[in-house]
Image (cartoon, grey):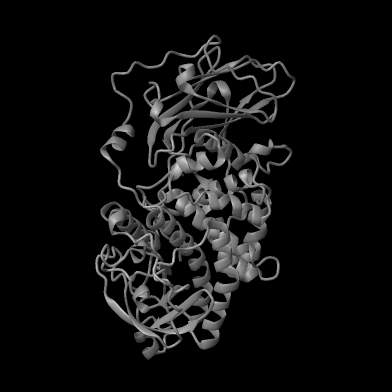
Amino acid sequence: MSRDRGIWLVGLSSLLAAACSSSNATQPPLAPCTAASGGRIALQATEYTAIDPAQTAGCAVFPANTTPSTNEYLLVPQGASGVPDDSASFQLRGAGLAAAPPLAAGAAGATSVPVQLQFDRNLRRAERELAAQFGRWLRPSAVAPARAAAPPVGDTRPFKVCGTLDCNTHPTVTATAKKVSAHVAIYVDSAALKSGDTLGTADLDALAAVFDTLLYPADTQAFGPETDVDHNGVVLVLMTGKVNSLVANPCTTGFVAGYFYGGDLLPPASFPNGNYAEIFYSIVPDPNGTLSCPHTATGVNHSVPGTFIHEFQHMISWGRHVVNGNGFPEELWLNEGLSHYAEELGSRLYVPADSTTFCYFIAGNLYNSGQYFTKPDSSFLVDTAGIGGLANRGAYWLFVRYVVDQFSADTSIPSNDAFTRTLEDPMRTGATNLAHATATSFSTLLGRWALANYVSDLPGFTAPSQLQYAKWRFRSDYPTIANRCAVNANFTGIPGAYPLTPNSSVGSALNLSGMLRSGSGPYTIAQQPAGATGFTLLFSTGTGTALRTSLVPRLNVLRLQ
């Protein structure tokens, strides 16, 4: 099962497609680097820099090692434009006083895509189209009507739901409010009530209590309040078998646990197929697999809270950007990163007392991040055109977690919340949003994050403060939590050891090639033996020409020893 939710998908324009094209085939190859080339590296241990190949004719020049020990440099090439889905071929080739044999580059592996992610992509594409199609003249009036009362228990009403994974049909179900509390009203559709495929009163009471006392405060404190387009003061939760049946048995690529759809916040004049309400949709128990793959009541109780806290961030974000801001949704990668960060916030509500529930919230993030660390150059960070595979999701969360750690006033939750609220900027999205919130260029943020991923808790190495996660020590946290979640929640997907392992080569013999995917890149350690002469690295396209400047290519370099 995947617990990865909603994706904000942006269609590529012709201009972006042109920007992502390869370098002009008529461009001459870059000249070999020499000792006189630009890009000279003069670093002490723990110091770092970023080389802009446009300023150095692609060259990085490393001085001779006059010490009695080996020098080691961590290298992470990146494309740092902040343009979603940008990519280009590259090579990083070393040279010394004599030619050196090349090293083979690894190939990217293919990964399967859970159906939840495919469904979310379709919703986010539809939301993007809605935001573009229905201008502010069709959106809610700036003068809000008087607030209505929350629906009473027993209230029965129709709802339109997604009938297929592409959400091109919107069948109507009738549902009854079975629990109404301070912040949520839980409706259960009539078909589930008739068949008995629903949670009992005690379970509904417990879910409402978790929403009211833990999840709702965590999300609204971190991201700001939700809209209240229906003026009833509560978020609706619709538990319906229509969510179960979005995926047919045997659910070989997972199932849809729940979702939020931005069309529900648009008025009927703009989108007649919505419900004009803050509403979250959830599966119902189906232990016999009548609707799709089986789901026990216990399984639903475990999955709904994590799904809710993730999707509620999307609801808040859509409301701020589209309904209140009259703009466009946040870009997929940052929006998802914030929602995965919300899952982490949920997990921290349960430590140290409840390890089992902690695992249900955090296991997905740790699994996904492990997938990213295993092969970081195979996945985009800055992503809108893809469907957000698990490794991509891991990158989104890691980057948001790092930025929060670096730019919050301190590491306490209230200070974190003050910063994350600035990331729900209705006037900015993506890289522009982050650069504004941090007063730091996006390329600088990316480079520091990339280096932090390896050195933040590297044994025997004291990372600069700008290259540290505050809340995680992944080399020890992965095995500790993997063991805990295997025992307490029967979850075995978390890495048992830190999976980011750079390749290693003598610097003058380095020959690395592949694709730079926006925000990501491979990790390599260049070694320079004691007494060795200097060496150079040429950072270019796969054909040896200059990398295009619109990619904002950077070669991040950190001296390990």
**Vertical arrangement, residue 118 with respect to residue 13, above or below:** below
**Vertical arrangement, residue 520 with respect to residue 371, above or below:** above
Q: Residue at x 49, y 44 (%)?
A: 375
Q: Quadrant of residue 44?
A: top right
In the picture provided, is 137 more to the left or to the right than 301? left
Q: Position of residue 118 (x, y in %)?
A: 35, 59
**Vertical arrangement, residue 159 with respect to residue 67, above or below:** below
Q: Position of residue 439 (x, y in %)?
A: 55, 37
**Res 542 visible:** yes
Q: Residue at x 53, y 47 (%)?
A: 374
In the picture provided, is 405 more to the left or to the right than 428? right
Q: Residue at x 38, y 37 (%)?
A: 86
Q: Position of residue 334 (x, y in %)?
A: 47, 49
In the picture provided, is 332 more to the left or to the right than 182? left
Q: Position of residue 561 (x, y in %)?
A: 69, 29
Q: Quadrant of residue 548?
A: top left
Q: Quadrant of residue 407?
A: top right
Q: Nearer the viewer, residue 109 or 540?
A: 540
Q: Residue at x 34, y 48 (%)?
A: 10
**Res 379 visible:** no
Q: How many numbered marks have been drawn onto this rendered protein structure? A: 0
